[in-house]
Amino acid sequence: GNSVTQMEGPVTLSEEAFLTINCTYTATGYPSLFWYVQYPGEGLQLLLKATKADDKGSNKGFEATYRKETTSFHLEKGSVQVSDSAVYFCAYNFNKFYFGSGTKLNVKP
Amino acid sequence: EADIYQTPRYLVIGTGKKITLECSQTMGHDKMYWYQQDPGMELHLIHYSYGVNSTEKGDLSSESTVSRIRTEHFPLTLESARPSHTSQYLCASSEYGRGTNTEAFFGQGTRLTVV
């Protein structure tokens, strides 16, 4: 069936550390893939997306590459900031949206 | 910036009261959604709509109801609120018929507390 699996959190990092949040998906075909971010008390915002295999989405220093072979879309950032503390959701759209369960990131000064 | 709005942002209400959570979007999107978000952060689809006069139940059973009389408006109603309805409710919208590329736009959410 269709699903998105994300690494469980919370993830706690020091400022300027490297971030990876793993995401794998099971889908029919090759849908576009999304990362959303939810800051405390807010709704979800689109962070980045990739529409086809080998595409790299990027925004605000975050990157994710659409890997068809491994059905993955891992989120990375080279140097996190305290302001990146939020919940991150991996997702795709195939007639409806499939979201991962969310990964909470805490960045300490 | 997304043009989708939810009101109220916060609501504390007594058991048994009827409530309506409002959601409006100005993007002309046909598809609209309601999600319930539990404290563990996971999103649960409770209702969606393909357009005017279309409403469907989502993956998570909910005692709430929705209506879609106008494209831009997708209110959610609870006839008799109970403490188990306490949650964060998120409304979203997206274009319809553009395949898998289309993204969802979310409102800021309504945090409902039933006492």
Image (tube, coloured by chain):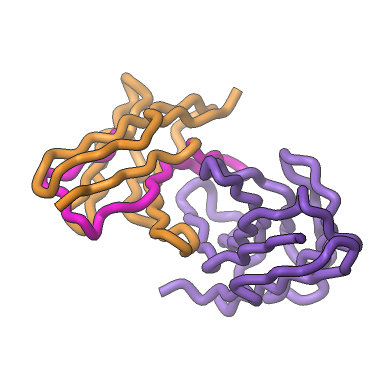
Give left or right: position of A52 versus A5. Answer: left
In the rendered image of this protein, does residue A41 appear above or below residue B8? above
Residue A85: percent from left, percent from top: 29, 52
Question: Quadrant where the N terminus of chain A lies?
Answer: top right
Q: Is residue A9 above or below residue B63?
A: above
Chain A, colour shown: orange
Q: Give the residue displayed 37% in from the left and 28% down from the top.
A: A7
Q: Is residue A92 above or below residue A71?
A: below
Q: Is residue B56 above or below residue B59?
A: below
Nearer the observer, B93 or B9: B9
Query: Residue extending furthest front?
Result: B115
Report how many numbered discs are placed on residues in the image.
0
Residue name at image x 60 percent, y 49 percent: B37
- Residue at the spot 19% in from the left edge and 49% down from the top edge: A108
Quarter-wise, where is residue B21 in the image? bottom right
Segment tinted magenta in the rendering: A74-100
Viewer-proximal residue among A24 and B107: B107
Residues B25 and B111: in front is B111
Name the spot of residue B93 as percent of width and height, x first.
59, 62
Could you tell me residue B97's position as x and y percent? 60, 55
Q: Position of residue A37 (x, y in %)?
A: 38, 53
Q: Is residue A84 magenta?
A: yes
Residue B48 location, quadrant = bottom right
Q: Residue furthest bottom?
A: B26
Chain with purple colouring? B
| Horizontal side of residue B40 vs B69, given as left or right | left
In magenta segment, residue B112: no
Is residue A72 visible in the rendered image? The answer is yes
Which residue lies at the image location 34% right of the left edge and 49% below the top edge?
Answer: A49
